[in-house]
Amino acid sequence: MGVDSFLKFIVILNLTFGIFPFCFSQDKIEKETRIKPREVPSEAKIWLQDAFEKIEKPKWILEYSQNGKSFEAKFKYQDHFHSVEFDSLGNIEDVEIEIDQSEVAGDVWKVIQSYFESEFEQVKVEKIQQQFSGAKSNLEDFFDEEDADGVMTQYEIVFQGKNVEWILWEALFDDSGKFISKLKVQIRPNDNLIF
């Protein structure tokens, strides 16, 4: 193998093992920027107004994450912080409502707690959100008329977990508390906008 061939081989190895792992990253990376309502697709604004008729002037956010670009409406409604996410075209993706641990059913929290105990030496829960997803019309009916048909409920929990070191995670659990997935959160100060 000549020098040129060897250098090409090293470059290919570097590209393969240097870039390839990023394709399967298990990290959550988000950057949020506040935007004006006129920058939001009308589809998103119409859906939000139909589902939550009594809210006024939600904060609109443009979010970039490992999944691409999306729009988010953040607002307080019925004493809870809400986050409604839309895709880049303005189609509803999900609604998340921040809740306290006491608002999670006891039997569900026991299953979640069991997962924490089996995976980590210590856990500090930072935020719990009840996540609702489903078809556009089903979600609208759920929030407008309290009709739960066709709506899936899950729990998204941001927590610090310690084994050797403390790491920030975001985990998803189903409506019975069963673990679905988790992502390591990569966040820099001021990347995410708090309510």
Image (spheres, grey):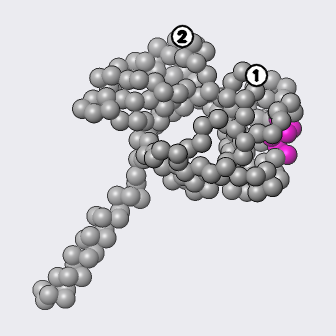
Q: Which of 24 and 97 is in front in this view?
A: 97
Q: Which of 142 and 73 is in front in this view?
A: 73
On the image, the x and y values in percent for residue 72 come to: 68, 45
Image quarter (top left, top right, bottom left or bottom right) of the C terminus: top right
**Residue under the image location 67 percent in, 49 percent down:** 34
Asked if 164 appears above or below 101 in the picture, the reply is: below
Report the magenta stretch's main SS: helix
* Residue 190: numbered disc: none
On the image, the x and y values in percent for residue 133 come to: 67, 36
- CA gap, disc 1 and disc 2: 22 Å
> Label 2: few (<14), some or many (≥20) within 10 Å?
few
Residue at the farthest top position: 106
On the image, the x and y values in percent for residue 46 come to: 85, 46
* Residue 106: numbered disc: 2
Q: Which residue matches tag 1?
A: 78
**Residue under the image location 53 percent in, 47 percent down:** 191
Q: How many labels does the image show?
A: 2
> Can the viewer see residue 180?
no
Instruction: Give the secondary structure at mark 2.
Output: helix
Q: Which of 150 and 12 is in front in this view?
A: 12
Q: Do the residues labelled 1 and 2 touch (CB within 8 Å)?
A: no
The residue stretch that appears in magenta: 46-52
Q: Does the magenta stretch include residue 50?
A: yes
Q: In which quarter of the image is residue 149?
A: top right
On the image, the x and y values in percent for residue 113 come to: 43, 18
